Amino acid sequence: MRSTDFFETHPLFTHEEFLEARAPRGATTRTSDNLLAKHLAAGRIVRVRRGLYATVPRGLDPKQTPVDPYLVATRLSSDAVVAYHAALQFYGKSYSIWRRFHYLTRRRARRFSFQDMEFVPVQVPVAVRALSEFGGGVVEKRHAGGVVVITTLERTLVDVLDAPEKAGGWEEIWRSLEMVEFFDLDAVVEHTDKLGSALTAARVGFFLEQHHEELMVEDRYLEWLRKLAPGQPRYLDARREPGQLVSKWNLVVPERVLKRTWQEVA
């Protein structure tokens, strides 16, 4: 494949992918590397990070060319999965727009910045780290000429309640999840069960119960989650913010979340 043809079909690509595409033409690694350097110098492509490149559309300034962050996050590791607030934002369900993008991976990696965006690796929770697709709820979506690997809305609901600091805190989480009109609740409960966290189960159960009418939550889902909830009272927030005990979930919930007081000033 000619390099120009390759660029037309690869908005984001790795060094290895470029070498593989050139191999059928008999190109050596050195020849392909030289060609890659030539296109880089000419502004036909830009380096995102070592071994990862983005194609610059014809006629655009390489210094001003926006690179899709979801494609970038997907390519930062061979097992990368866009998750948490970034997943909500991808689906158009985030209350606020962030320039920080979290992705799941089994590998230890450092966060890095590109253009004005920050990419943050998150090690997959131990309970699902060894499972296929990190326990499920992972899909591929065609996007911006490429493919994004991302958590489903159902898994995202559980994940942001499991790690609220990766989604902007309770108000951002509540307002974002309330933008979703439908969840497959079997998938929500299944992933909650796999995580094996009693606190997360209580958070998910409380959220679903609070929105049982809007989300048409049947009692059987709440009963299932109650069996997973903690046996002793726990704070909703890791900072142990005072609040009211919701006994059926053994969860101390801050008044601002219990009454959703942010709606009063919306």
Image (tube, rainbow, N blue to C red):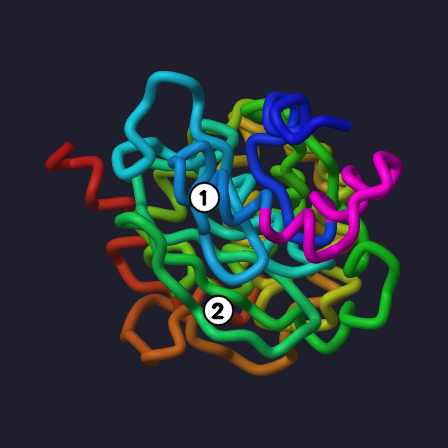
Left or right, 146 with reference to 261: right
* Residue 10 visible in the picture: yes
Classify the position of the C terminus by image quarter. Answer: top left
Q: Is residue 88 a member of the stretch shown in magenta?
A: no
Q: Quadrant of residue 57?
A: top left
Write the start and end of the magenta stretch as one range: 17-34
Which amino acid does the dot numbered 1 rest on? Leu
Q: Is residue 24 a member of the stretch shown in magenta?
A: yes
Image location (x, y in percent) of residue 234: 49, 78
- What residue do we see at 78% from left, 68% from top? 128
Image location (x, y in percent) of residue 67: 42, 36
Image location (x, y in percent) of residue 6: 67, 28
- In-front residue for pair 2/131: 2
Image location (x, y in percent) of residue 249: 56, 64
Q: Of callouts 1 and 2, which one flags the residue occurring earlier in the amino acid sequence? A: 1
Which residue position is annotated with label 2?
251
Instruction: Report crowding for label 2: few under 14, some 14 to 19, many 20 or more residues within 10 A (C-alpha).
Output: many
Residue farthest toward the left in the current orientation of the protein: 265
Left or right, 203 with reference to 5: left
Which residue position is annotated with label 1?
40
SS at mark 2 in the image: strand
- Which numbered disc covers residue 69? none
Magenta segment, principal secondary structure? helix
